[in-house]
Image (cartoon, grey):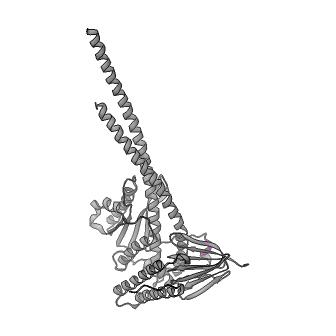
Amino acid sequence: MADTMQFDLVSPERSLASLQVASVQIPGADGDLTAMKDHAPLITTLRPGVLTVQGPEGEANYVVTGGFAEISGDGTTVLAERAVPFGDMTEEVYHDMVRSAHEAHAKARDTFQNEPGPVDDAAKLLADMVAMGGHIGLTPPNF
Amino acid sequence: MPSLKDLKNRIESVKSTRKITKAMQMVAAAKLRRAQDAAEAARPYAERFNAVMAGLAASVGDSDSAPKLLTGTGKDDVHMLVVMTAERGLCGGFNANIAKLAKQHADKLKAEGKTVKILTVGKKGRDNMKRDYGDLFVGHIDMSEVKRVGYSDAQGIARDILARFDDGEFDVATIFYSEFVNVVSQIPTAQQIIPAAFEAKDDEAGVSTLYDYEPDEEAILADLLPRGVATQIFSALLENGASEQGARMSAMDNATRNAGDMIEKLTIEYNRSRQAVITNELIEIISGAEAL
């Protein structure tokens, strides 16, 4: 790995990863993207999904929910609202995430009855959460 | 003059008080370390977040379409004071200092003819402010069930505040908490969170980089500003946690030392009285013997 860049994954409570990596695949709000060294500076928000890091010790996966990523030529920083290493991702954690998205959706529907914007956003978040379950092989809870 | 037995009881009771305060001090020291670690671990997130937000806020600027959370409602009439204190007492002036700062602030705003609303987080602040400002209270968030402050707790508080903001309940929100400097010094601090104020660091190289934004700047701002409120509240909660334990630790250290002084004084008094009693008895025996 000749070309590496600094990668930091930070959640509000702690820093989860800080290492030199070859590439990072990020679930951006408008679609997945892969950042490598000398990527054009970019700031993007995240949708719930799987973050894949190609590091010196092989591939590492993290499940992230909302937040944003800051990409510059020599490094990438992901500030995730909630980030869980793939191995720690259990059905319980996933169900908890889906449940809170579901509640947010229900609440948005009640609060903004005549404004589709926030309701659609919440519905998209929920759909993203459910889709993420498909990626990691977990089934969402039934409501 | 207290009897010997009274003095002995007093000494025993102060001794057990000293044991309790000593134990509390040690517990606070252990908790302080944990709270400090948590505050330190959370710092990178808050720093990066603020740096990015400062850049974003500068580029969106004062355009009309900028979110209200950033530019404000255009008015400055109703102020929301969020007073964050501890759930428990016995920590020196910690709670009182935060409440005092909030009271000063409230009085100043009232003198300027503004409307003040108060939201308390933590039981002690509510108790402290209730007598004089009870009619201004709009809500209270109970933290007594929370063992270890997590980001989700901050999110809960932020949601509450943002919902009130969306309903137009206030124009400006300020949080009051105690900033942790070291064990002996905690500074009560007021920080405005709505409209958001980000400190832009001029010397930072990142600000000069021109970023692409995906989706556009305003959409990102609208998404991130509510998170910014939660992040600021989270850091404040953590600072408060460390401050509380630091304040309790030094308060209990003082109490332990005072108890020690008191025991010393009481012991001297006890010995003196005992000596007096013995002398008295001897005099009685001798004078009895002489009389024979």
Q: Position of residue B133 (x, y in %)?
A: 29, 63
Determine whether, in the image, residue A33 is placed left or right of residue A13: right
Q: Position of residue B243 (x, y in %)?
A: 45, 58
Residue B32 in sight here = yes
Residue B203 colored in magenta in the image: yes
Quadrant hosting residue B165: bottom left
Q: How many marks?
A: 0
Read off the magenta span.
B196-206
The residue drawn where x is 38% and y is 33% is B267
Q: Main secondary structure of the magenta part?
A: loop
Determine whether, in the image, residue B135 is placed left or right of residue A75: left
Residue B212 in sight here = no
Question: Farthest residue toward the right?
Answer: A2
Look at the image and tell me in which quarter the N terminus of chain B lies: top left
Quadrant hosting residue A116: bottom left
Look at the image and tell me in which quarter the C terminus of chain B lies: top left
Q: Position of residue A27 (x, y in %)?
A: 56, 84
| Residue nearest the observer in this picture, B208 or B193 | B193
